[in-house]
Amino acid sequence: MTGKLRLGVNIDHVATIRNARGGDHPDPVRAAEIVARCGGDGITAHLREDRRHIRDDDLKRIQGATDLPLNLEMAATEEMLAIALAHKPHAACIVPEKREERTTEGGLDAAGQHNHLTPIISQLKDAGIRVSLFIEASERQLDAALQMGVPVVEFHTGEYAHAALDGDHEKVERELKRISDMSALAAKNGIEPHAGHGLTYENVQPIAAIPQLAELNIGHYLIGEAIFDGLEPAVLRMRELMDLAR
Ligand SMILES: CC(=O)[C@@H](O)[C@H](O)COP(=O)(O)O
Ligand SMILES: NCC(=O)COP(=O)(O)O
């Protein structure tokens, strides 16, 4: 049976615009409040090591402003671990991070970093934080996630989104199949599959139709659309498209 697909709204890029002028406007906290009012299921925020968008004080303010679960995206570093343990978000999604990248370019190499990730995951879990790994939809990475005992994985949909933009239909189908196959395998093994990165009104529905997926995290496109239509209509439109696909 296909359950409700949650929509986590990533508000990072409200902070990107704020930071362009160094002041307080627009405030990502106000975005979180709007998401909460219009039926978003969660707030996602990526505290990057270089603080290019979300900043440390935003986390506490977001947590104080809404009851929606906060999904903190974080690199697997001691600094980020300490911040996560201090804030105790509902969930922490461990993501790969490269200082010079424009955005999160690929999935976490969970298979290659087993020894580094295991103690970080267990400290997050001991603090009651729901740990997720942001990985490519591959059997190797999913196996590693299983071995590490995480309850959630988020599949990186960037390759799928790029293929859709390029009009490469064969690649779109290949990417969809691997995300769909790995979602089924994750669910079969008791891991809750999520997906996100580069999702738009145009490309969200085939992903939303994957029955095992429990949550999509969507940010950059929604904040872009919000400039033209407002954040609430953008979230509601995405919600509608996701629901129609189930
Ligand atoms: C991990 C991820 O996909 C999100 O963090 C999202 O991409 C927004 O942050 P960036 O644009 O900084 O990658
Ligand atoms: N984990 C993916 C995410 O939070 C949102 O990615 P994007 O929609 O900003 O590309």
Image: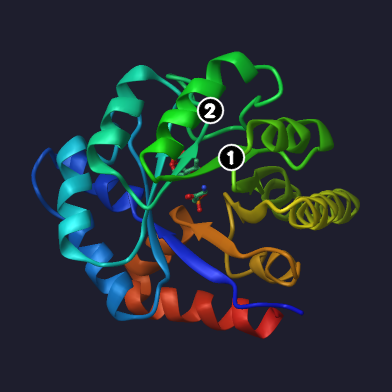
Residue type, label 1: Phe
Residue 120 sits above or below residue 237 on the image: above
Q: Are marks 1 and 2 in contact (CB under 8 Å)?
A: yes
For residue 246, side relative to residue 154 (left or right): right
Q: Which quarter of the picture shows residue 47?
A: top left
- The amino acid type of the residue labelled 2 equals Pro
* Residue 6 drawn at (x, y percent): 53, 70
Q: Which residue lies under the disc numbered 1? A: 134
According to the picture, the residue beneath numbered tag 2 turns out to be 96
* Residue 99 coordinates in the image, percent (x, y): 42, 19
Ligand 1 is within 8 Å of the C-beta of the residue at disc 2: no
Look at the numbered disc 2 and give the secondary structure of its residue. loop
Would you say residue 50 is visible in this rendering?
no
In depth, the one of 84 and 124 nearer the eye is 124
Q: Is residue 114 visible?
A: yes
In the image, residue 198 sits, relative to residue 54, either above or below, namely below
Give the CA distance from mark 1 to mark 2.
Answer: 8 Å
Q: Give 20 or 123, whichever is nearer the viewer.
A: 123
Q: Position of residue 240 (x, y in %)?
A: 55, 83
Disc 1: residue Cβ within 8 A of ligand 1's nearest atom: yes
The residue positioned farthest toward the front in the image shown: 126
Position of residue 203 relative to residue 129, above or below, is below
Counting other residues with Cα less than 10 Å from the Cα at mark 1, is it few (<14), some (14-19), or many (20 or more)? Answer: many
Q: Quadrant of the C terminus?
A: bottom right
Q: Quadrant of the N terminus?
A: bottom right
Q: Earlier in the sequence, mark 1 or mark 2?
A: 2
**With 102 as the anchor, is 58 left or right in this view?**
left
